[in-house]
Image (spheres, rainbow, N blue to C red):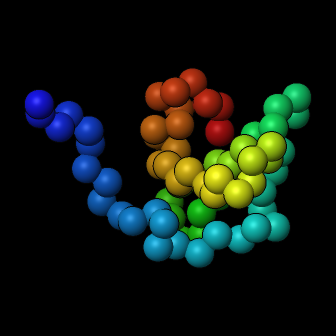
Amino acid sequence: MANDHPKVEIDLYAHRLDESLFTEVAGTTVAYAPIDDADDAFAVRDLSNVDAGTLRLPGAALRKLGVAI
């Protein structure tokens, strides 16, 4: 099976994440924050399960999912 996933050029998990920048999306349990020193990249977390950690994605990937950032 071929890997059709785009190659990520930068390791977003290696970047610092400022916890104070997380913003809750109104009416959801989702919060997001920009990733320091990464152009157009965001961390997303589920506030109902913060121990699950964060998902870090380029803004383009989130917009493909229909997320307005």
Tell me if residue 29 can be seen.
Answer: yes
Q: Position of residue 26 (x, y in %)?
A: 87, 34
Residue at the extreme left: 1
Tell me if residue 43 can be seen.
Answer: no
User: Residue shown at 11%/33% (left/top)?
Assistant: 2
Q: Quadrant of the N terminus?
A: top left
Q: Is residue 63 left or right of residue 27?
A: left
- Where is 30 relative to 10, above or below? above
Q: Is residue 52 left or right of residue 4?
A: right
Give the quadrant of residue 67: top right
User: Total marks drawn?
Assistant: 0
Q: Position of residue 7 (x, y in %)?
A: 25, 50
User: Residue shown at 75%/40% (left/top)?
Assistant: 30
Q: Quadrant of the C terminus?
A: top right
Q: Position of residue 21 (x, y in %)?
A: 78, 62
Q: Is residue 45 left or right of residue 29?
A: left
Q: Position of residue 20 (x, y in %)?
A: 81, 67
User: Residue shown at 80%/43% (left/top)?
Assistant: 48
Residue at the extreme top: 66
User: Residue shown at 46%/63% (left/top)?
Assistant: 12
- Where is 57 relative to 19, above or below? above
Q: Is residue 67 left or right of residue 26?
A: left
